[in-house]
Every structure is written in C-alpha cells, then in structure tokens.
Image (cartoon, rainbow, N blue to C red):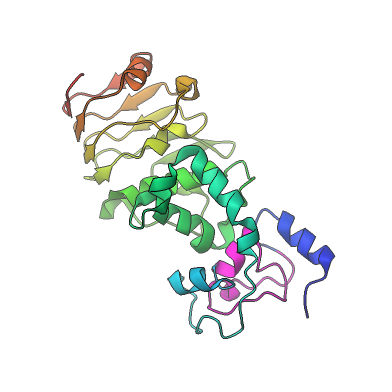
C-alpha cells in the first residue's frame, strides 16, 4: 500500500534508518521499497539508492542482487537533493563536487547513496564531520588505513577520537599514506589535534574558509615527514603560527 501522509512525515524526520519491521537486506538490493516502512527516506539513503534510476545504477551496494527498476522508481531523493548539496557546499567547492573521480564527488555519493543504516539527514549535527572524513578517506590511498565502514559511526573509523560524538582528534601517522590532504579537514568543528606525520602525502596545504577563527580549537598539527609542497597562503600561515604544537618539518614548502 502507499504510505499515508502521516507516515511520510514521520519517515522524513527520523535520524537513523531504524523503524518497526526494518529489514537491512532491503537496503540497496536494487528494488525500490517505496510503499512500505521508511526505506525511501533520507535516513535510509532512499532505500540505499534503489528508488532513483541514476543512484541505483551507480550503486555498488553489497546487498544489490535485483535489476534496478524492476519495482519502478519513486525518487523522493529529488525533493531532498538540494539540502544535501547546500550542506556539501559549505565546505567543498561546487567544481570539486561536480568532478567525477574527485574525493569530494566520491564522498558525496557515499553519503547520499551508500551509507546504509548510518545515513544522516543534512540537518544532523554530525552530517558535515561524516562527509569530511569520507572526503579524507577517498583522497588518500593506503591498505593499512583500512576500508570505510558504512556500518559504523565515524568516531569508530581508524585514527579518530571523539568526545560526545564530535571528532576531536585524528591520528593517522606512519601508515605510508599517499594522496593529498583535503582542505575540508580543517573545517571539522572543534578539531583539536591532527597528526598525519611520517606518510607520503603530497600537494599543497589549503583551507576552504575565509574566517580562520573556525580553526581556533586546533592545538596540535603534525604534518612532518611527508611530501607536501607549494606556498602556504598568508591567511593559513598566520593561523598556523598560532598553533601551540606545530610541526611541518621535512616537507617541500617554499615559504616555511
């Protein structure tokens, strides 16, 4: 049966994909469960992407075993997509989000379509920190870092320490990581410590914000013994000099 209006309102408000009669195997199986439960909601990733043609065909969800579209599409996601994009664009540029193959694009697809029962609505307090950590994951490469666990809270991801559900420390040193440090990492509210030392990270050190007061909580930044290069902008450099424990040695910066 089609969901009653009251049911739709309830499903639009849930924060986690968990409701009476919930069956995890329905999420991302290729069949749009639009007329039962709350599968076709933001919290459930719009049935793991099953309910929209583009997201279903793009999905590589582990549960997918049916042919996309067999049960028809009821793309409720189209009504919520703007709210996702608005939140992503707080910390990421529109061009990065639009570029297939970028870490930002991959993270946005993960958050919207692949995040299983940990999918968050854009108005959730944790939404941006989960997205930012996904950007970081897709921007680096190393087997020792592990795989992204869609089935776990981002506070349980490798190297992450939280307080009251908010990320306070990221420590991923000596993992031989390659790739670049996304500017978004410095936009995690309340981040106090970031240690990515003794890896093989490359590229420039950037931050996507105009008001560097957002970084006032950062007390430790250790990026030593990497392959970072280029010129650090005056705004970022001024802020870095205020950090209590700063270590940028053994990189290739031109102005440090």
Location of the C terminus by quadrant is top left
Q: Front-most of 76 and 35?
A: 76
Tell me which corner region of the image, top left, top right, bottom left or bottom right, holds residue 221: top left
Q: Is residue 31 magenta?
A: yes
Tell me which corner region of the image, top left, top right, bottom left or bottom right, holds residue 92: top left
Q: In this picture, which residue range is highlighted in magenta?
A: 19-48
Q: Front-most of 181 and 171?
A: 181
Residue 191, compared with residue 149, is above or below; it is above
Q: Residue at x 61, y 66 (%)?
A: 46
Q: Residue at x 30, y 23 (%)?
A: 233
Residue 215, compared with residue 10, is above or below; it is above
Left or right: 194, with 85 as reference point: left
Q: Is residue 145 magenta?
A: no
Q: How many marks?
A: 0
Q: Front-most of 202 and 224?
A: 202
Residue 2, compared with residue 228, is above or below; it is below
SS majority, magenta: loop
In this view of the protein, can residue 243 be seen by the observer?
no
Q: Front-most of 124 and 98?
A: 98
Left or right: 17, with 198 as reference point: right
| Relative image position of residue 168 (x, y in whole percent) | 48, 32
| Relative image position of residue 54 (x, y in whole percent) | 49, 70
| Relative image position of residue 225 (x, y in whole percent) | 19, 31
| Relative image position of residue 35 (x, y in whole percent) | 72, 76
């Amino acid at each position: 049966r089609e969901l009653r209006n009251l049911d739709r309102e309830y499903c639009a408000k849930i924060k986690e994909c968990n409701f009476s009669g919930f069956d995890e195997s329905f999420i991302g199986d290729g069949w749009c469960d639009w007329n039962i439960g709350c599968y076709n909601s933001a919290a459930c990733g719009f049935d793991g992407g099953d309910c929209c043609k583009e997201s279903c065909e793009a999905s590589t969800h582990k549960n997918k075993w049916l042919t996309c579209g067999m049960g028809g599409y009821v793309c409720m996601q189209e009504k919520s997509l703007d709210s996702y994009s608005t939140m992503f664009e707080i910390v990421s540029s529109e061009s990065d989000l639009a570029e297939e193959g970028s870490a930002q694009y991959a993270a946005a697809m993960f958050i919207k379509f692949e995040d299983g029962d940990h999918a968050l609505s854009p108005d959730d307090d944790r939404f941006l920190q989960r997205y930012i950590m996904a950007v970081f994951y897709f921007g680096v490469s190393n087997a020792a870092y592990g795989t992204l666990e869609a089935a776990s809270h981002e506070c349980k991801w490798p190297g992450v320490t939280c307080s009251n559900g908010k990320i306070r420390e990221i420590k991923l040193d000596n993992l031989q990581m390659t790739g670049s440090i996304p500017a978004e990492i410095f936009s995690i509210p309340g981040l106090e410590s970031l240690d990515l030392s003794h890896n093989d990270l490359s590229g420039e050190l950037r931050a996507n914000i105009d008001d560097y007061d957002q970084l006032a909580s950062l007390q430790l930044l250790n990026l030593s013994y990497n392959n970072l290069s280029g010129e650090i902008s005056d705004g970022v450099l001024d802020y870095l000099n205020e950090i209590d424990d700063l270590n940028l040695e053994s990189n290739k910066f031109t102005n440090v």
